[in-house]
Image (cartoon, rainbow, N blue to C red):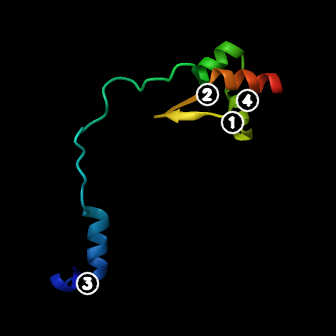
Amino acid sequence: MAARLGVPLQDVARWHRVEGPRYVSKLPGRPKGKPQRPAGTLTVRDAMVKFGITAAELRKWREQGLPYRTVGTMILMKETDLKAWIQKR
């Protein structure tokens, strides 16, 4: 492409990085409403209220291997996994 246009390759690479191709979604914008939480899962806040655990303790447990997943910005953990983790400790 650079040779065909007579433009230095660095300029083509810079253009591609800054102005490059845009892939337009068929569904533009954010989805309507809040992300749905799967049944049987708890957010960090729910776990704190239900089990009397601090957020720092939950963070430490996640680092140690407590299974969790994220949906958007929500951190979710299965209630059964959390109960089993607490019983193990």
How far apart are labels 4 and 3 at the CA level? Answer: 55 Å
How far apart are labels 4 and 1 at the CA level? Answer: 9 Å
Are circles 4 and 3 on residues that touch, CB within 8 Å? no
Q: Quadrant of the C terminus?
A: top right
Q: Quadrant of the N terminus?
A: bottom left
Q: Which residue is mark 2?
A: 77
Q: Which residue is mark 4?
A: 57
Q: Amino acid at mark 4?
A: Glu
| Helix, strand or loop status at disc 4 | helix
Residue 9 in the image: above or below residue 51: below
Mark 4 or mark 3, earlier in chain: 3
How far apart are labels 2 and 4 at the CA level? Answer: 14 Å
Tell which tag, 1 or 2, sits nearer the viewer: 2
How far apart are labels 3 and 1 at the CA level? Answer: 49 Å
Residue 27's spot in the image, x, y percent?
A: 24, 38
Mark 2 or mark 4, earlier in chain: 4
Mark 3 or mark 2, earlier in chain: 3
Are circles 1 and 2 on residues that touch, CB within 8 Å? yes
Q: Is residue 27 left or right of residue 64?
A: left
| Helix, strand or loop status at disc 2 | strand
Q: Is residue 1 left or right of residue 61?
A: left
Name which residue lies at 77% across and 23% down: 86
Name the residue at the top extreme: 50
Q: Which residue is mark 3?
A: 8
Q: Which residue is mark 1?
A: 62
| Helix, strand or loop status at disc 3 | loop
The answer to which quarter of the image holds residue 69 is: top right
Mark 4 or mark 1, earlier in chain: 4
| Helix, strand or loop status at disc 1 | helix
Q: Amino acid at mark 1?
A: Arg
